Amino acid sequence: MIGLTIFQNNFRRNMAKKSGFALTLLLPIVVVILGVTANYISKPSFTLGIINTAPTTVTEQIIRTLRETERVEVENANPSTKKTDMITGRYSAILEFGNDGFQLESVKDQDTLATLFHIVEKYSKEPKPVDIEMLFDTSLGIPERTCAFILLFLMVTATINASLITKDRNNGTIRRIKYSPCSAASYVSGNIFYNFTITYLQYFIAISIITILRLDTGISYGNYLLMGVWIALFTTAFGTCMASLFRKEMLVNLFATCIALIFSLIGGSFISLEKMPHALKQISVISPVRWFIESANIMEQGKSWFCDYTSILVLTGSTVLLFAIAMIRNKHMKTI
């Protein structure tokens, strides 16, 4: 009952500033929808520089077929600046034709280079474009990028929602709790309940609109709603924990943003887990992003959210740990 009272009190406090509350509620929904839409319509491309000083029928056939291949951009490269162009990222690879065949140069890994070599050889025999998805093994698919983006953004917004704890600490509310029947656990539980409700409502509205717009991200609506419970719980726990650690809102938001970005970096938001260095792969087990991405991989295959027991256990354990830290921290604040 005390937790419910705190929930109602937080709601009334925010409703006192209706315009600010509406902005805080609606802006994350709009950003999530725009972010997911951008992930849906954007696909990585492969820019190939061509050096063909002595054109032949075969080389022209290869170049023409490469131009017809989806997600491959073909440009004429300058032989004198090819090294610089690859280092600066202008070209993903350079294909140079000579009297003895062709030569490929790239800063990509050997597997990517071998795949590209195989494609060029195939085009020299048959001018039929092929699927080049194998060239993007280091990139995440739409479901994985979508989950990683939503999680990262909600970790930040949930921290902002939890800033009421910081305000209560600064104005002495938490200190006065020790003179009332309300315990630190009840106080934190009420804030968690409020934060979870707002976060899941934002998530639910955003995912529902995305579904209505028929943006196929590879995960069913039902699985999104189930996964959203854990996303909202974890981000709420994360935000509550961050707000409980510092006295200033600026430090809370700055630290939470940095931690969220680190989790994204080591969790596989920018490079697939399979392509990570071994040491980074071992470190990534502490990142919730990794476990949500692994669940997205499973759900992309048409399976249920509950099929990935490992991710659910890890995420649930992480959530409980963050809640415990927040409660312990606020309990000690009572004596200040």
Image: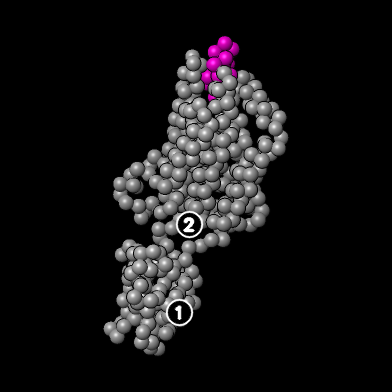
Q: Residue at x 58, y 23 (%)?
A: 168
Q: Is residue 51 magenta?
A: no
Q: Quadrant of residue 124?
A: bottom left
Between 179 and 304, which is closer to the camera in this rendering? 179
**Residue 65: image tag:** 1
Q: Does residue 157 sit above or below 320 in this rendering?
A: below
Q: Which mark is residue 333?
A: none
Q: Amino acid at mark 1?
A: Thr
Kindly report the secondary structure that dominates the magenta region of the rendered protein.
Answer: helix
In terms of sequence position, does the residue under pointer 2 or pointer 1 come before the other? 1
Q: Is residue 285 above or below residue 175?
A: below
Q: Quadrant of residue 132?
A: bottom left
Most foreground residue, 107 or 328? 107
Residue 316 can be seen in this image: no
The percent position of residue 25, horizontal first and vertical second, equals 65, 39
Instruction: Classify mark 1: residues with Cα within 10 Å, few (<14), some (14-19) or many (20+).
Output: some
* The magenta segment: 173-188
Q: Residue at x 33, y 73 (%)?
A: 104
Furthest toward the front, the residue is 80
Which residue bears the numbered disc 2?
141
- Looking at the rendered image, the quarter that the N terminus falls into is top right
Determine the residue located farthest toward the bottom in the rendered image: 57
Amino acid type of the residue that numbered disc 2 sits on in the rendered structure? Gly
In this orientation, does residue 148 appear?
A: yes
Residue 247 x %, y %: 50, 26
